[in-house]
Amino acid sequence: MKRRTLGSSNLQVSIVGLGANNFGGRMDLEATRRVVHKALDLGVTLIDTADSYGSNGASEDCLGRILGARRKDIVLATKFGMAPDRSGKLAGASRAYIMQAVEASLQRLRTEWIDLYQLHRPDPATPIDETLRALDDLVRQGKVRFVGCSNMTAAQVIAAHESARRIGVTGFVCSQEEYSLLAREIERDLLPAIEARGLGLLPYFPLASGMLTGKYRAGAPMPKGARLTYSPRHADQFVTERNWHIVGELEAFAARQGRALIELAFGWLLSRPFVPSVIAGASTPEQVEHNVRAAGWSLSAEELREVDRITA
């Protein structure tokens, strides 16, 4: 498994990561164990979770139970800021909440440190200086190695970067945002802001919730158990006439190169030097193997131009 540097940190991560959003929810402990062990055996070193995944932090709890001695072999990333607090209110990014949230995550993950601690979404009620000072304290205490953000606008990324420099604290090393062949909107404003400040980009929904795996067919019944089958919210976002048209053209283009659609989805993202790793979820060991194998296509400049033509 090839590795890349995670943004402006010194962390080396596998180019294929494992997303843990289904752990402790749609997947029980044993199903999760099989997926995690397969990923580790195949050289995956980045696992990304959040305190809001699963019920009451169940995703983190599953990972804590499973990793054991292999914890030291991975870059463990989690997020805060979307799980309800003890009063039932939606969490934010205040110092008080961060200090409470990190201790709960460390306990569930059964670890003494978190490699990448990410703000899940911005909190307009809390000044960014307060959030960054709290995160900097966690880094100084050794509980967190690096910090990142997610779901921010270009203006918020710029403000956070300038704030960290102004007050002399640890800044974000990466940003986790939606990015795929079917979702390129961040290229307009957010991506230039991220690149200019040396942040890495961790794409979420890199396979457009399955639309880029090749398992969905226009006019055919939706596959049983797949995300776009059981989740109307994701289906409304991705299952559109425009996307069916683009997917058809992309699949035909990949086939002409002797490749599969999922290889194109991974290869295109990994052609971006600012993308250190493509984090993809998996519910079976076979899906993990499929994702790892899919990351082997290095697209040429001509192939990238053709992809731009199709997805423009």
Image (tube, helix red, strand yellow):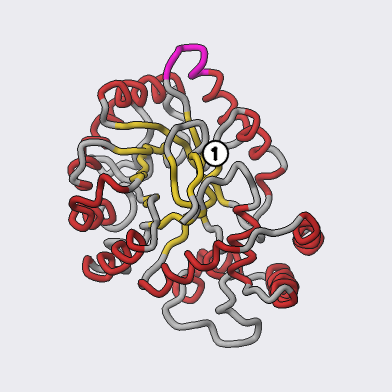
Foreground pick, 13 / 95:
13
Q: Which image quarter: residue 31?
A: bottom left
Rendered location of residue 296, percent (x, y): 57, 63
Q: Residue at x 35, y 27 (%)?
A: 94
The secondary structure that dominates the magenta segment is helix
Rendered location of residue 106, percent (x, y): 22, 40
Which residue type does callout 1 highlight? Gly
Q: Residue at x 60, y 42 (%)?
A: 274
Q: Residues within 10 Å of mark 1 (few under 14, many from 20)?
A: many
Read off the residue under disc 1: 200
Residue found at the far front of this picture = 2
Rendered location of residue 123, percent (x, y): 44, 33
Q: Which residues are magenta?
A: 163-169
- Residue 69 on the magenta span: no
Q: Residue at x 44, y 46 (%)?
A: 13
* Local SS, label 1: strand
Foreground pick, 182 / 146:
146
- In-image side of 166 versus 283 (left or right): right
Position of the C terminus, as image quadrant, is: bottom right
Foreground pick, 15 / 141:
15
Foreground pick, 1 / 71:
1
Residue found at the far top of this picture = 167
- In-image side of 184 versus 149 (left or right): right
Q: Is residue 276 visible?
A: yes
Check the image and report above or below for 124 versus 48.
above
Residue found at the far bottom of this picture = 220
Rendered location of residue 271, percent (x, y): 65, 52
Q: Which image quarter: residue 33?
A: bottom left
Q: Which image quarter: residue 95?
A: top left
